[in-house]
Amino acid sequence: MRVVMSEAGPRRWAARTKRALSPRGALALQNIDGALSFAARAALTTALPAVPLAMAGRADAAVYTILGSLTTTFGRNLPYGRRARVLALVAVAMTLCVAAGSALGAWARPQDGGAGAAVVVTATALVAGVAKFACDATRLSGLGAVLLLFSFAVAAYGAPVSSDVLPHTGLAAVGAATAWLLGVSGRLVYPDRPQRFAVAAALRELADLMEAIDAGGGHGLSRHRATAAVLEAYRTLGVPPPTAAERSGRDGGTCLRLTDLSWSLLVGSARRPPDDPLGLARCLRAQVRPLVSRRPGRPELLPALSRAYEAGRGDTTTVARRRTTPAAPQDAELRAAELLTGGAHRHTLVLLMPALRMVLGTGLAGAAALALGLGHGYWAAITAAAVLHSVNVRTAAQRAVQRTLGTAAGLLLALGVLATHPDPLTLVLVVVLLEFLLEYGVAYNYGLGVVFLTPLALLLTDLAAPMPAGALVQDRALSSLLGIAVALLCALVVVHDRAALRAKHALTACARASERAERALTDRDATLFPAAQTRLAAAVVELREADDAAAGELWPAEIDPTELAAAEHRAYGLLDRLVRGR
């Protein structure tokens, strides 16, 4: 952690600050497959335990099942085996957050102010930091740490007494268990759907690359995105990219064949662009439609892609002549495991600094809300956490814009709902609808999700402890503005210089992986090709991601762009040679 100093000069520092705080891209929409079905599953997960409780007159208890059901937002596109493990861990974490929050709230009584409220503010900041570190280390994207923090804070400020701790924990466990069951139940209907979505995403990114090649000029970012998407498809399929010798002998169905073809086109286009990139892009996009179709059954390769795939399988004429024994099964498993973990080394300090920024931001926001006497002051801490749950200062600025616009629209929506004075059962049904809209909207843009997240949080608060609608909306507005301001201030004052260190390490790692690949090719040792290819592919993706993350900080890596481009060009050229075995 480094406090901003003026060593770079006022003008240079002003330019860095302006670049880092640019909100460009904050309102861009993403193209996500399966968003509708995922949102429907999330709404059903919320409704199954909560609606019966509301019908029985215990809508206040339904709040805690809803907190547990937030587990469903994790592991959206993971294959079912990994999803079951991830959701199980998240379910335990979510339940523990509710248990810890309820226990702390019963002991400290933060609603009474004083030392108890200060203790809960401190605990909230620590939970935010731990959750941020854990989500970054495990690569859990989305709302991630914010939802864990939200569950803890709502339970802590829900005016519990000692006798409420176990019931609240049990209700949260029921909601989390429901989320787990519904999250893995899709395996019975569409067992390969996550794999198909991952392959479809890879084909889209590859089509974008082909269009960029046709347009001419630089297409490094498009190539990076395509590489990352193809590697993600291999991770989802649970296999590593093949070498020339392996491609001619493995056949794991259409999804694997399409991914192998995508890999060949990706690395081959770095050496020799295709003759008709636009036609190839159209063919790739046409293949996406049967992959994302809701109809069961396996898609078939289109004729043009099928011919390209078979031609690629036959491109094994010059394989290594020394020790050409195929890789043993355990070697393939190790390569797949390395690919699943991301390949590149994750430095603890690189992960620790954003977590410390999160602790500071949420702690200061919560303390400021407490000092100003804001009701529901934990909303300021949650808002700060949402802004700081980002990659760098630039994405924090984007989150701030999204949070501001989304909260403003959401408050109007919440005010309209509360103005009708709905009964508790109606409130629960509206919460279920908002959960559907939240999960559907956030898949396309975070700000769109905040539009529905804001009234959802307000309605849950009103269910737990009813109060006048005007006061509730005013508290939320003031707390949100305070949280956004504190988060941006922390992002600017606490400079994450470790992001620059990560970029430099990534450049070194990519160079070393390239050297290993060159040695394997020089020695013509086919047994070294698989590991060399896997490490090099992961290293070249990490290089671009690390450089982009550092570029959005006030302490940039200052890597020469030509050096970065040369390292990428060398890596893709070596990957092409490894794939062709020559």
Image (tube, helix red, strand yellow):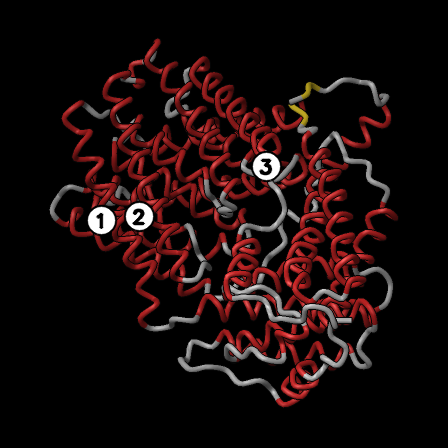
Whether residue 101 can be seen here:
yes
Give coordinates of residue 174: x percent, y percent.
22, 46
Label 1 sits on residue: 50
Of callouts 2 and 3, which one flags the residue occurring earlier in the amino acid sequence? 2
* Distance between the alpha carbons at the discs numbered 2 and 3: 26 Å
Q: Tell me if 518 is positioned left or right of 485 in this view.
A: right
Give coordinates of residue 582: x percent, y percent.
78, 71
Label 3 sits on residue: 400
* Distance between the alpha carbons at the discs numbered 2 and 1: 9 Å
Circle 1 sits in a helix, a strand or a loop, which is it?
helix
Q: Residue furthest left?
A: 56
Asked if the residue at tag 3 contacts the one at tag 2, i.e. Cβ–Cβ closer than 8 Å, the answer is no
Tell me the amino acid under the disc marked 3: Ala
Name which quarter of the figure residue 274 lies in.
Answer: bottom right
Tell me the amino acid under the disc marked 2: Ser
Whether residue 434 can be seen here:
no
Res. 244 mark? none
Indicate whether 478 appears above or below 182: above
Give coordinates of residue 436: x percent, y percent.
38, 56
Indicate whether 305 appears above or below 438: below
Tell me the residue at 78%/52% (across/down): 515
Name which quarter of the figure residue 59 lies in.
Answer: top left
Circle 2 sits in a helix, a strand or a loop, which is it?
helix
Tell me the amino acid under the disc marked 1: Ala
Res. 69 mark? 2
Around disc 3, counting alpha carbons within 10 Å, would you say few (fewer than 14), some (14 to 19), or many (20 or more)? many
